[in-house]
Amino acid sequence: MNLPLHFGFLGVVEAGLIALLLGMVAYAVWRWLAMRFGWSAGRAIGWACVSALVVGAGLDAWNLFYLGFTRLESPLYARLALASIHDADSLGARVLCEVVGALSGVAIGYAAFNRHSDESSVGEVGESGANRD
């Protein structure tokens, strides 16, 4: 996300909560698109997960990936690579919380938006007529 967050554990929690909100918004947008174009709920969930992960954890995940594969033989290269990363000490924890937050946000959005459609079908008679009062 590359936002000026706090350092340490507080910054990790902030990044995770922002990613959670992004996941909920991503699911709302993709659910609207799925309803408009007649797509299945699975397609909306899948694309919401992908877009929430790209927006929520994209830059931090790329920095973590880049640090794993770049050549840091000299202290100069290491300093240059770490200088561009906000709070490089807790980068791994921040990426983990962003991924978990984004996916949890999509799941919470799915549960919140589909609760209304489930409540409207409660008490209706099915095809077999098993719900007779």
Image (cartoon, rainbow, N blue to C red):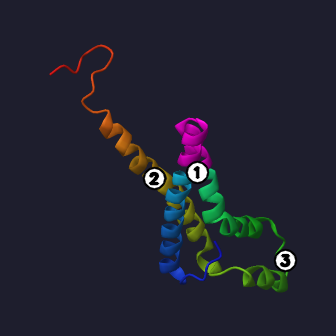
Q: What's the residue type where badge 3 is placed?
A: Glu
Q: Of callouts 3 and 1, which one flags the residue occurring earlier in the amino acid sequence?
A: 1
Residue 35 sits inside the magenta stretch: yes
Residue corresponding to mark 1: 48
Q: In the structure shown, which secondary structural element does the residue marked by tag 3 occupy? A: loop
Residue 59 sits inside the magenta stretch: no
Res 126 visible: yes
Q: Of callouts 2 and 1, which one flags the residue occurring earlier in the amino acid sequence?
A: 1
Q: Find residue 80 and report its image quarter.
A: bottom right
Give the total of numbered labels.
3
Depth check: 47 or 124 in front? 124
Q: Find residue 62 and report its image quarter.
A: bottom right
Mark 2 or 3: in front is 2
Residue corresponding to mark 2: 109
Vertical comparison of 30 with 89: above or below:
above
How far across and down, in percent of the image, does residue 133 sit?
A: 14, 22
In the rendered image, the residue lying farthest to the left is 133
Image check: 44 left or right of 17?
Answer: right
Query: What's drawn in magenta, residue-wise?
Result: 30-48
Depth check: 125 or 84 in front? 125
How far across and down, in percent of the image, does residue 24 sit?
A: 49, 57
Q: In the structure shown, which secondary structural element does the residue marked by tag 1 occupy? A: helix
Q: What's the residue type where badge 2 is placed?
A: Gly
The Cα–Cα distance between marks 2 and 3, rounded to whole angstroms, is 45 Å
Bin the neighbour count of mark 1 within 10 Å (Cα to Cα): few under 14, some 14-19, many 20 and up: many
